[in-house]
Amino acid sequence: MAAKELTFWDHLDELRRVLFRILGVWLVLAVGYFIAMPWLFDHVVLAPCHNDFIFYDLLRWVGRFFHWDDAFFTKAFEVRLININLAAPFFIHLSTAFWMSVVTATPFLFYEIWRFIRPALYTGEQRGVKKALAIGTVMFFLGVLLGYFMVYPLALRFLSTYELSASIQNHISLNSYIDNFMMLILCMGMAFELPLLTWLLSLLGIVTKSMLRKYRRHAIILLVLIAAIITPTGDPFTLAVVSIPLYLLYELGILMVRDKKQD
């Protein structure tokens, strides 16, 4: 028996239920993160401030392996934050819990999107959309992890030790640290959606494989500029750490796109 066709109001009612489920999951996660935030702040959010952070151990290992004695690879690193705003700790407690819940709820968000649009798709379209949402979820978290374990520590290490003048001492505020922490990590997560975006644009007929190959050199310049904006550190090492993954994502997008067959 054919499935009953839903009316416009039925779709709105279903959308309302989807939104309530998503908001409910966000709220539960946000409350959980709010309760666990003191521990998360010490062991996760502030971890890049300490010399024993895993990426700094990797830098020291690289320095020893290649016998590089540059301070970038050998110097001990520690950042002490200050707070100059009376209400900042409380509001940062709230906002950090909220954004952590948003990030970790992404798989559920994509799943609800899939459930909502699945009835309107043909079997072949269902496979394509399901694959796209799964890839999008994985790529987003890969970007978040790269941002947390590599990009942000590099930016923090450079910017916190950069001296405009010997007469000026760097004192990093809690607000500044959290703003940059969230911005860089979320930007890296969104940047890793580039292959998915390319694939969706190809479905709309906006881009093709031959077009992406033709403008590869222009794309490289643009990606380097984006990397420079994401990590305004100025040193070639950090720029390469960000721009190379972005370029690889561009090439992955080319592999995912197919040129339309000519009649």
Image (spheres, grey):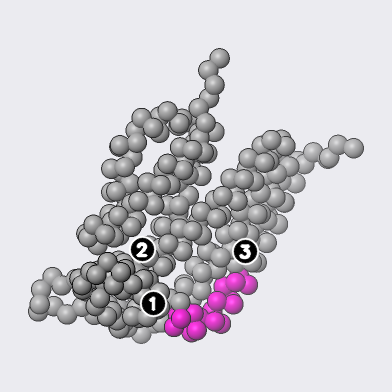
Left or right: residue 235 versus residue 230 is: left
Q: Nearer the viewer, mark 1 or mark 3?
A: 1
Indicate which disc, 3 or 2, sits on the residue closer to the N terminus.
3
Q: Position of residue 260 (x, y in %)?
A: 53, 25
Q: Which residue is mark 2?
A: 151
> How far is mark 1 from mark 3, CA to CA?
34 Å
Q: Which residue is mark 3?
A: 23
Residue at image position (42%, 62%) is 146
Relative vertical location of residue 42 with respect to residue 151 in this rendering, above or below: below
Seen from the viewer's position, the closer of residues 86 and 184 is 184
The three-letter code of the residue at mark 3 reads: Leu
Q: Position of residue 59 (x, y in %)?
A: 32, 70
Question: Could you tell me what secondary structure mostly forms the magenta stretch?
Answer: helix
| Res. 81 image quadrant | bottom left
Q: Nearer the viewer, mark 2 or mark 1?
A: 1
- Secondary structure under tag 3 reads helix
List the residue tagged with mark 1: 53
Earlier in the chain: of badge 1 and badge 3, it is 3
Give the CA distance from mark 2 to mark 1. 13 Å
* Of the image marks 2 and 1, the number of the one nearer the N terminus: 1
Please name the residue shown 65% across and 54% down the image.
Answer: 111
Amino acid of disc 1: Phe
Secondary element type, mark 2: helix
Boundaries of the magenta span: 27-43
Which of these two is toward me, 216 or 108? 216
Asked if the stretch drawn in magenta spans residue 38, the answer is: yes
- Residue type pointed to by label 2: Val
Residue 181 is tagged as: none
Quarter of the figure that contains the C terminus: top right
Q: Quadrant of the N terminus?
A: top right
Left or right, 130 with respect to 47, comes to right
